[in-house]
Image (tube, rainbow, N blue to C red):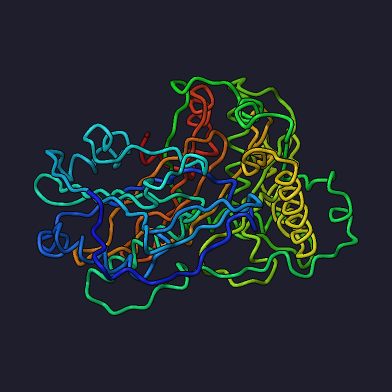
Amino acid sequence: MRIDMGDQLPTEAVSRQITNDTQFMFQFYKPCFQFYAPSPNIDSHMSPRRLQQSLTTALHSCPLLLGRFTVHADQTISHSYDPRNPNLPTFEFQSTDLTFSELKSQGFAYSLCQRHNMDLAIPDGAIRRLSDEQPMLMVKVTYLHGGGAAVFAMTNHVAFDGNAMFSFLAYWAQCNNGHGVELPVDLQPVSNAILTNVDQTSDISKDAAQSPAEISVDATRLPAEIGTMITRAVSRDTMIPCVYSITTQDLRKLKQQVEASGELQDGEWVSSNNVLTALISQCVARANMRAHVYEHGPWTVFQALDMRRPLGLPLRGLGSPIILAECNASADHVLHPDRLPALARRVRMSVDAYTPEYLRNAMHWMHTTYAGLARDGVNEPWRHFWFSALNTNRRCVGVSCMNRIPIYDADFGAGRPVMARSFNPRPNYVIVFPGPPGETDVYDSLHMYVTLERPAMDALRADPEWTSVCTLVSEF
């Protein structure tokens, strides 16, 4: 069903420009489950009527979830809101014979939820496919046999990234509990002004043909041809998605080993995310080469970087302009576990290399190139850009650390989620989420979403460096 917003819709909302950062390159819906343990409060606090009323309240304060993508005459895209024609979200309820204990025993596997019809069909998130009736938000609540519940939600990533989606779910939960809270800053559109103070004399600004290494564009090929060109041909049946866990204690130990290795020079430092990126990159690249999925050779390693941090911009608000901070790793760096400190240092240095000047000029290049494609009449210019590191024909492995996302903050009055689950279809690109909260309500583990071809996944499971600190939570 669609959510009836009544006559209480906001009269206006600030539109968010999509094509002034890299967010337009992520055109898909991101689904996620949140699982709630049996509680006597589920019947009272998570009843269909109460959840629908509180969701309506939350949406009144977040009208961009009722918005649509608008393609303007110059082919720029904005995420806009108009109360006369709201893009209504969908909200469904069901009960199932599946129990919480059965779910838990299977590691809350996503595929088990699918078999019990607890999810929703994931639409094509491409901007060209978004009709007036395409919801920006879709929710489905399943009440488990014997107690417990699962909340399935998805938003379009172009407008609402993972942080925004989970911030909204937490905000909805607060509205459900009757708290008169203001809209969190994470859900407010802000102007990042990335293109201000661009040095027009820099190499990137002077030569529109000289793209930054991280971003590619091709106007000579159709978008479908580009997709084929940068995607390794493998059968979906051969791809194995898994969720692994590493404790924050083990990650601290790995970081201490790097710091004590003597590899870091005076004044140099590494973050826990740099160390985790190095570990994942070593093990995933090694597994791919040992399984002969990729030939032996150097690898490109990347860590997703929110450009707002080096630019000194506010880290809150809708949208996170991303660039993939790349570095080169020799086969020696990934084949030998004792090179972990050296690789972690390389990852740190690659992140530090992204200066404000470089990032502004890279975005200026992309903005200028995009405008040029539009002027030349290129159809759907937003489909002609891609991140070079996501070309699966290359030996690339990367990590997106999202361990600050509030996945477990949505307490509707029956307790916080005890587990969350999504999936990652892209091979060799590992997404890191916080694990469930521990006894102190602070997460004490990280969940890594890893998808590899079957031979490589078998090799990863046999790698003692991986299995010594990483535990399988569940397969897809």
Q: Quadrant of residue 355?
A: bottom right
Say whether residue 226 is left or right of residue 204. Answer: left
Task: Relative to 408, say whether 374 is above or below.
Answer: above
Q: Residue at x 37, y 34 (%)?
A: 476
Say whether residue 121 is left or right of residue 79. Answer: left
Q: Position of residue 439 (x, y in %)?
A: 30, 64
Q: Nearer the viewer, residue 84 or 185?
A: 84
Q: Residue at x 10, y 64 (%)?
A: 44
Q: Position of residue 322 (x, y in %)?
A: 62, 54
Say whether residue 54 is left or right of residue 378. Answer: left
Question: Quick check: can you spot residue 274?
Answer: no
Q: Position of residue 394 (x, y in %)?
A: 69, 30
Q: Quadrant of residue 21?
A: bottom right
Q: Nearer the viewer, residue 92 or 72?
A: 72
Q: Quadrant of residue 121?
A: top left
Task: Relative to 448, say whether 178 is above or below.
Answer: below
Question: Quick check: can you spot residue 337?
Answer: yes
Q: Position of residue 189 (x, y in %)?
A: 51, 68
